Image (spheres, helix red, strand yellow):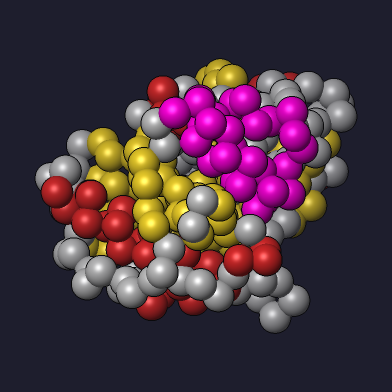
Amino acid sequence: MLAAYVDFSDAVEAGGAVVLRVPEAPESPMLNRAIGLGVDAPAAEHDVEQVLAAFASGTRFYVAVAPDAQPDELSGWLAARGLQPGWGWMAFRRAADVLPAHETSLELVDVETTEQRADFARIVRVGYGLPEAVEPRIGRAPDCGWQCLLAVDGREPVGAAAIYLSEGVGYLGFAATLAEHRGKGAQSALLAERIRRAAAGGCDVLVTETGERRDDLPSNSYRNILRSGFEEVAVTANWVGVGR
């Protein structure tokens, strides 16, 4: 759901795509990416040039190529400009049917205070291997329409996740658990709670995404999503480039 990240990022339109930029994390293509190229209308080569020009020099970025993006030559145009195929993202979808509450010793709390925002930002930043400089931006997520949650073990925040509701759709994101606290059921509990909130908020559908399943890449998040009743939709290819 693009709207969930537009306010969170420094977003511009270029070449018929929306380009999301987070200058505090120039090495993270997950945060610096172009979405929608060739989706609303077939892209032309000059659209590709405009998209690439929107990224600052030295920034590692993704250009997402959706399964229905046109024309068929789009991937070839990206390859000709030095971009390489990266880790694609699988999209998932499920009805907003409430799951039974997941049994866990952890407490789930809303992110409200300044301290909770800092904890949320730190856990997400560590979970995704992002630089510390991005924490203030992540901490603004509640101001950008996200409902943010923490999983707490005693007094220690150990997991984080959020949901963005818009026009009957709930989008799940920002899910992370500190490595030393994995196996306590944090993400299963946070998934169930976010699905409950989506249903209570009038959503009919929930969507989320994670890296496509490969033998050499992690799949814990993938398995948790499937266990929570989501179905695979399609893989969006991510072409990796570096700003010129």
- The answer to whether 100 appears left or right of 6 in the picture is left
Image quadrant in which the C terminus is located: top right
The spot of residue 48 in percent (x, y) is: 66, 32
The spot of residue 199 in percent (x, y) is: 16, 53
- The answer to whether 105 appears left or right of 58 in the picture is left
**Residue that appears at 39% across and 31% down:** 112
The spot of residue 28 in percent (x, y) is: 73, 41
Is residue 134 within the magenta segment? yes
**Residue that appears at 28% across and 39% down:** 165
Depth check, front residue: 129 or 234:
129
Is residue 136 within the magenta segment? yes
Image quadrant in which the N terminus is located: top left
- The magenta segment is 113-140
Indicate the quadrant where residue 162 lies: top left
Depth check, front residue: 53 or 160:
160
Depth check, front residue: 92 or 86:
92
When the figure is inspected, residue 130 is found, relative to residue 151, above or below; the finding is: above
**Residue that appears at 59% across and 20% down:** 10
